[in-house]
Amino acid sequence: MKSKDKRYRLSVFRSNRFISAQIIDDEKGATILGVSGKNLGEKVKGSKSEKAEILGEFLAKEALKKGVKKIKFDRGNSRYHGRVKALAEGARKGGLEF
């Protein structure tokens, strides 16, 4: 793989209460950026899906600061539905490409 075509992996984990996401460099085995619904705290009101979309936008903004634009989406064992889908749409809205 050419270095300019390098894509990091956006890994999503969803629990009953929170959702978290990490951008991972698989070649180095290192996490570049990690965010969680706990980062938003109580300052964001709305449903869990609305919070997940806001978290996706926040993740995209922080990733762009670190120079990450293109990613692969790894939803893990979760279906692409509900909060996982909302986080992905928020990340796309924030400027990430996948």
Image (cartoon, rainbow, N blue to C red):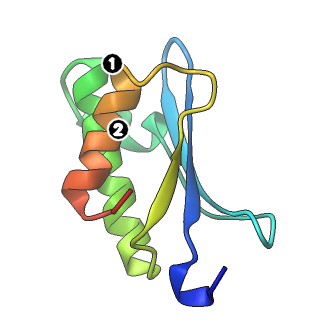
- Image point (38%, 79%), residue name: 65
- Image point (49%, 16%), residue name: 17
Tell me if mark 1 has few (under 14), some (14-19) or many (20+) residues whose alpha carbon lies within 10 angstroms of its own: few
Q: In this rendered view, identify the residue nearer to me: 82 or 57.
A: 82
User: Which numbered circle lies on residue 31?
Assistant: none
Q: Which of marks 1 and 2 is nearer the N terminus?
A: 1
> Which residue lies most toward the front here?
1
- Image point (48%, 62%), residue name: 71
User: Which numbered circle lies on residue 87?
Assistant: 2
Up the image or down, 17 lies above or below 85; here it is above
Q: Quadrant of the C terminus?
A: bottom left
Q: In this rendered view, identify the residue nearer to me: 41 or 66.
A: 66
User: Where residue 27 sits: x, y (%)?
Assistant: 78, 71
Q: Is residue 52 visible?
A: no
Q: What element carries label 2?
A: helix
In this image, 95 relative to 13: left or right? left
User: Where residue 48 sits: x, y (%)?
Assistant: 31, 20
In this image, 3 relative to 67: left or right? right
Q: In which quarter of the image is the N terminus?
A: bottom right
Q: In this rendered view, identify the residue nearer to me: 94 or 47.
A: 94
**Residues tagged 1 and 2 counted as in contact (Cβ below 8 A):** no
Q: How far apart are marks 1 and 2 (CA)?
A: 9 Å
In this image, 90 relative to 34: left or right? left
Q: What residue type is labelled 1?
A: Gly
Q: Name the residue under label 1.
A: 82
Q: Is mark 1 on a helix, strand or loop?
A: loop
In this image, 26 relative to 72: left or right? right
Up the image or down, 60 lies above or below 16; here it is below
Q: Which amino acid does label 2 sit on?
A: Leu
